[in-house]
Amino acid sequence: MPTLQSVRGRAAAFAALITVTAVCAGDAVARSFPFGSGTRSVNDLGNQFVPFHAKLWDLLHGRGDGGLLLNWQSGYGTAFLPDLGTYLTSPFALLVGLFPRDRIDLAVYVITVLKMAAAGAAMAWLLLSFVTKRRDTAPWWVAGMLGATYALCGWSVIEASYNPMWLDGLIGFPLLCLVGEWVRAGRRPVVGPLVVALVWVANFYTAYMATLGAVLVLCVQLLLDGGVLRAWLRVLVRGAVTVLLGIGLAAPVLLPVVMGTRHAYPGWTTEFKAAGWSEVFARALPATYDFFTPAVFLGGGALLLAAVLPFNRAVPRRERVAWAGLAGAVALSLQWGPTHLVWHAFATPNGSPFRQTFVLSGLLVIAAWRCLAYGWPGRRALLGGSGVLVAVGLVAATDALTGRRALALFACGLAAAVAALLVVRLPRRRYAALAALLLVGGLAGQAAATTAYADRARLDRLDHYPAWDEAHEKRAAAIAEVDGWPNYRTDPGRTQITANDPLLLGGQGSSYYSSHTPDVLTRTLGALGAGWTSNGRAVQSLDNPVVDAVFAVGARLRTEEEDGSSAGSSAAGGSSAGSSAAGGSPEVSRADVPPLVTVRPPERTPPHYGPSPFRNQELLLGSRVYSAPVAGACPAGREVFLWAPDYYGTARLGDAPPVMLRGDKPRWRAAVTSLGTAERAGERITFDRKAPTTRTVACLDRTRLDAAVDRMKKTGAVSVRVSDHGVRAQLPPGSTGTAVLAAPRIAGWSCAGKPADSSLGLVAVPLDPDGTTTSVDCSFRPPGLRSGAALGAASLLVLLGVAALSVRRRRREGPGAVELPAPGGAPELLPAVEPAP
């Protein structure tokens, strides 16, 4: 006779198998990577997650510039621990190290599919923890099917599949519900907090939502258990301690993430808007897609069983009301502003506003399982549930999101589920096999079709980026060939494949896109004329010789496009990201630049940026190198620069090739751009559409710039050493004034044991006025790391105390008792007996 553990394992494996099969089949039908030429790297998947996984690959293999604390490759030097905690602390992320680096896209795909499979397995395991004393509960394969249904819910295959860090929450919800079962039974006081810590470290954002959902499940279980208020309070206190201990253990990662968010550029704010109910019902159907409505699709079998539950009189009335009421209440909470804010940690997301939908999917799957806890539902209950879903389909048919394909798949799935639940009650085993085939086949077919539909729909509606190909290889090789860090920086170029090209391709540029893009970085580079997308969260490379001199960019990658019509344009943030950049032949331009640490002369008053990016560049450089155009034109031989941050279109100097500018307030900002060198006096700038009202033209004198660089080199550091946590520089004898590190003064920098100063947004160290300072030693520690480590250590000590008490209690109870599951998953202590022959 199989044990409960082996049955759980069988169901979990079955759920994982169905999940992997359906996802891969859907991607293959859509001819999406890795089964075809269509890229799957849409939106933040290609722009953030793939580059960050490439950075993790470098760290695992001892490559890249910087370490866990400091990332020297992005944004001229940024904190890495907040990014690590946000995007890369899932245990699955470590699998990236097993793949070749040029197969980074395949690695992320495999990790994504494995996460979905793990979510299905975890849910199947949880469902079989909700056991009863009756022997006629549904067989293990139904738990596996429902687990796969959860893993293949619309939220998973449509939204989280290109936000793979969210999938850790999909895994976390059933795990945290399982912890709730342990708490209710007074079991596993050490393992429980460890599971909570693992879930919160993997992805704190969705872990927060999963924790709320698990608390609701625990409360329903307590209500169904009955008992006295004192017993309920004991369980709730035990649960609160378990959660707080787990979060405390995760604090060394969580607190730096929280502090990184506080110091990040604000991006944009949005207000919540409830979806129309016809849209909500439409999204319950397979093969529908929309970015601003909840993806509540579930395979026909689970949705039918959840709808049958209120009509199934075999289930006690109180249990029917509790589980159906919980699912309904959570569904309504998605649509109400105050509860929407609670689900999202009191901040409305910038995109995809229904990110908590996976919790609703999990609750519906649990409701479906509880519908089977007292046997297969009868015909009357089945008729009632079918009527509910028919009504859902009729309302959904009135919405524009619902196409014929969606209605046909919905109808077929419903028919298959109804047929399965009718034949499974027949006495012969072959009918059970037929029922399993109908339920699993209907689920896999609907999920695969929805996956394929979403693959195609995302390409039409979202920005997309190419998988690693020959263009990536050429650029990475060109960067590696000239990389001279830390003597100088190598910028991957203005024409970007992604907004995180330094992480993906190598080098040390200003490009950076993250939820933690520092406020000081965006504002400093913005003052110097940088462009951006995502309303300032995705800062772009600024191809400007003055800025390159200030930040010690001695090598810069350029492609053919930058010499032609798309010169200076940014592909990041637009759907042309891959296509416009992939065909360019990379060329490297070199420049003589000062070291990373330079010395500025003493100043009476601290300098401040003004409205002109050209004057701001000169202020940071310490020399005048620009002149204003005379009579609207630059002198012959001067390089002409245009600043028109809000203009979207092309600009042309005389007969030179047009240059594309991409400004579109507030999301996009066009950078200061070179229009070329004036061949003769009087050359005018023309635009392909109405000339921008906000524009400034400046004429760069290269001779003056060369002289300024020479001065900075003579007074700059003699030697510079960098590490993954700081910088040490040796200065020329007699240096006075201010030593400036060519890195943004983000929170966490300290020099000589005290917080570093800031000079025009860069790390600065005042030097002794008598010229006795010979070196500068600055270190970086992400804010929140020290307090997080202290809280983590304290939580660990408490957990060790709990473990010691648990061991002592077990010794007192002795070895003569074994645990058997009781109704609702609570174990009963029964005398140990020998198994019957």
Image: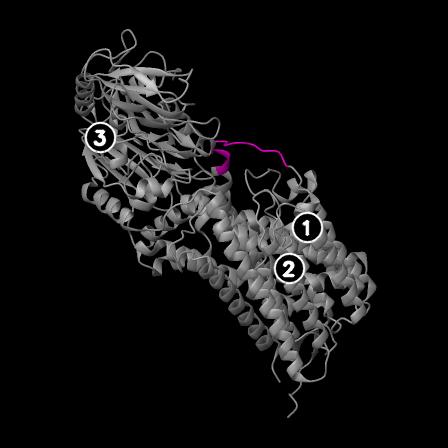
Residue 10 x/y as whole percent: 56, 75
Q: Is residue 221 magenta?
A: no
**Residue at the spot x=72%, y=67% of the render?**
824
Element type where label 2 sits in the image: helix
Relative depth, front residue between 261 and 599: 261
Residue at mark 1: 396
Element type where label 3 sits in the image: loop
Between circles 3 and 2, the one closer to the viewer is 2
Residue 356 x/y as whole percent: 61, 48
Element type where label 1 sits in the image: helix
Q: Are marks 3 and 2 in contact (CB under 8 Å)?
A: no
| Residue 484: assigned label | none
Relative depth, front residue between 503 and 646: 646
**Residue type at tag 3:** Pro
Q: Is residue 265 magenta?
A: yes
For the record, the magenta segment spans 261-272
Q: Is residue 234 above or below residue 710?
A: below
| Residue 595: assigned label | 3
Residue at mark 2: 410
Residue 24 x/y as whole percent: 47, 63
